[in-house]
Image: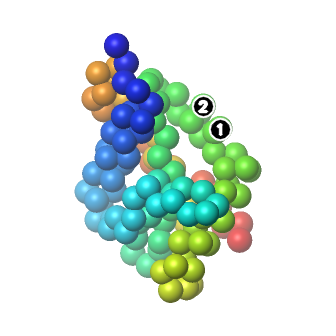
Amino acid sequence: MGMVSTQRGRMAEDAAAWYLRGRGWHILDRNRRTPVGELDLVCREGEAVVMVEVKARSGNLYGEALESVGPRKERRLRAAAGWWAAEHGGEFRLRFDVVVVALLPDGSLHSLAHIRDVFGNRG
């Protein structure tokens, strides 16, 4: 029997946080709810504050996962990031990354893909 979506999401976020920490990133916030949306992971990589959207999949469906981060999701993430930045004292060099985590039916990690700067440098 498969895992419920919330369990799969939490396991994917744990895997993404573990992966990023292993590369020297600092996790500043997790599952941060704002009035305009939720941020899965807020991290610091060097001078950049990176908003990381985590997508959990039960297979090797990276394209499908990335397609779910379209213009509507971008607007929500940018608005939530602005809210977070205002709460934390202002101006940050922000970037938006996606981590796609593929889990096996038992919940173990199958693969992980980190896509940096998914929205480019569009304001």
The label number, if any, that marks residue 11 in the structure image = none
Q: Quadrant of the N terminus?
A: top left
Which structural element holds mark 2? helix
Q: Amino acid at mark 2?
A: Glu
Q: Which residue is mark 1?
A: 67
Q: Residues within 10 Å of mark 1 (few under 14, many from 20)?
A: few
- Residue beneath the point at 44% across and 24% down: 59
- Residue beneath the point at 61% across and 72% down: 82
Whether the residues at callouts 2 and 1 have beta carbons within 8 Å, the answer is yes
Residue 101 visible in this rendered orientation of the protein: no
Residue 29 x %, y %: 39, 65
Q: Is residue 59 above or below residue 17?
A: above
Residue 111 x %, y %: 36, 33
Residue 103 x %, y %: 37, 29
Residue 65 x %, y %: 56, 36
The label number, if any, that marks residue 64 in the structure image = 2
Which structural element holds mark 1? helix
Residue 29 visible in this rendered orientation of the protein: yes
